[in-house]
Image (cartoon, rainbow, N blue to C red):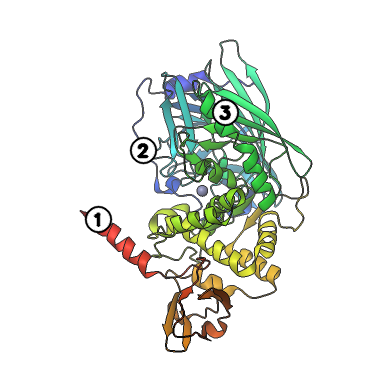
Amino acid sequence: MSLRLPFTALLLLSTAGIAAEKGQPPITAQTSLSGGPLDPIQKKLTLDTADLQIEVDPEREVINGIALLNFTARDRINKVVVDLDKNYTVTSVQVDGVDAAFANPEGRMTITLAKKVAKESKLAIKIVYGGRPHTAVRAPWDGGFVWSKTPDGRPWMATAVQMEGCDLIWPCIDYPTYEPQKVDLHITVPKGLKAPSNGKLLGVTQMDDGRTIWNWEVKHPNLYGIALNVGPYEELSGTYKSKFGNEIPMFYWYLPGEKDKAEKLFAEVAPTLDFYESVVGPYPWADEKVGVVETPHKGMEHQTINAYGNDYAKSPDGFDSLFQHEFGHEWFANQLTASNWDDFWLHEGFTAYMQPLYGRWREGDGRYTAMMLASRTGIVNKSPIVAGKPQSAEDVYVRAPGRGGDIYTKGSWTLHTLRNAVGDKAFAEILRREVYGRSDPAPGNFTTQFRTTPEFIAIVNQVTGQDWQWFFDVYLYSAALPKLVVTRNATQLTLKWVAPNGKPFPLPVEVVVDDAVQKVAMTGGIATITVPESAHVVVDPMSRVLKQDDAVDAYQAWKADQAKK
Ligand SMILES: [Zn+2]
């Protein structure tokens, strides 16, 4: 376990003392993509397990690594292809203990096998690499390594690579479904620093010179969820007694001098678990830990070591929404993982919806509705939130106008509208099947799930016994929102849905006529009800339905004008 890392390599590769500028060294187009097209050879491989020894040198801003990767060939192959940022110098590659030829011109590294191997062959590949990693510009959005200092001037670093992928840190196959079954991490840090990371701590190895090696083991890690965190952390810990009968260790690593604030945040962990375990289901990583670490960047859903950088912000909602959001990704991103980045909204839409649902859990419908309406103005409807074809993370987040925000807000409002349409009981069942692949999740009876949007829709149809394709065709696969056209004459009120491209949209709507609420079935997308001439009418009084809204459109246009001034 405590293998010493090659210091000769460290000295050769370092640019001592010169801090990297943001965005440096630059990365190739290949490395900047996560989940882009797979290489044909990668399609013939699974990465079964990985063992990563990584030494972090915060003074020089370099790392050195030894990656032991165990693959299975799913077909006859004579090469192995892994993704690794070419800014790292690779000093050695071995296949089953024998030196192998390799080339890594663009961040996609080809390793030549001595001979063609048969289908189902196992390959153990050892890659020794090191150098100065890519520095984040604006983590977590433009990610990479974040080299920072604590207020008292000590080294503090983190990684956040969701957009660019695991290949900024270690040699991997940077595609969502290539999660190894297990990753072992051995992180070496200078004297006085700690390295909280993913999964279960197997032990800390003390070296003679004061350095320590932090040995972690994580099962089924989400690839962008593997993270390095180094700092002079202090630690809070506790045990959560789950309603499912098990006990879960909880940890928070925070910067020295913040004990009071840290204790207040740590006190939010158990009630947040109460909510998620009740509304979604069992915490997926109970046999490892709940882990939160303070980071120099805002936040990221690193599996069992959630990044928290919200500076203990206060909110009238009464809880730390950033912590609550990132923690929700343990279910929606880490337990359930989108099969392709086109399904990114399965991470962000569901997790964004968990904040108003938590408001409702804590305080009731008033808080819930206030939080929903606060997010409504953020929906821009410029691109559909699902394209229906393979996408990289960047395609979704950056390239399609407005999509990067709408996967959160419009995703959340789509689920809000769905819950109101199918009811709480069916919605809870949909969540369980979606997240765990079964109706009765309990500790030990489920494993991680990869999901596409069509699979989610199939679950909704199964649970409700109805076909909801028309609903998702409009909310997920169309850019524009459906418009509810309301006309009234002396005795009648007519409601008519106008959905993009004339799509069918028979979604029921509530109407208040004077003091009486009625639910209007919109069969065929249209309905007429009798309304006395003197009656006061409010359509959708509880804002249960996501629809085009003149006031929101006018507000957004005015805000855009203001921003130009
Ligand atoms: Zn998120």
The residue at 52%/82% (across/down) is 525
Q: Secondary structure at mark 1?
A: helix
Q: Secondary structure at mark 2?
A: loop
Amino acid under disc 1: Gln
Amino acid under disc 2: Gly
The residue at 44%/60% (across/down) is 376
Q: Nearer the viewer, residue 270 or 154?
A: 270
Whole-angstrom CA distance, mark 2 to mark 1, is 31 Å
Say whether disc 3 or disc 2 marks the residue closer to the N-terminus: 2
Residue 419 higher or lower than 512, as above or below: above
Residue density around tag 2, few if under 14, some if 14–19, many if 20 or more, within 10 Å: some
The residue at 60%/73% (across/down) is 468
**Res. 152 mark:** none
Marks 1 and 3 close (CB-CB < 8 Å): no
Report x, y in % for residue 76: 65, 53
Say whether disc 1 or disc 3 marks the residue closer to the N-terminus: 3
Q: Secondary structure at mark 3?
A: helix
Whole-angstrom CA distance, mark 3 to mark 2, is 35 Å
**Res. 23 mark:** 2
Residue 472 higher or lower than 191, as above or below: below
Whole-angstrom CA distance, mark 1 to mark 3, is 41 Å
- Residue furthest to the left in view is 565
Residue 277 higher or lower than 127, as above or below: below
Residue density around tag 1, few if under 14, some if 14–19, many if 20 or more, within 10 Å: few
Residue density around tag 3, few if under 14, some if 14–19, many if 20 or more, within 10 Å: some
Residue corresponding to mark 3: 263
Amino acid under disc 3: Glu
Locate the N terminus by quadrant: top right
Residue corresponding to mark 1: 562
Say whether disc 2 or disc 1 marks the residue closer to the N-terminus: 2
Q: Looking at the image, can residue 484 be seen?
A: yes
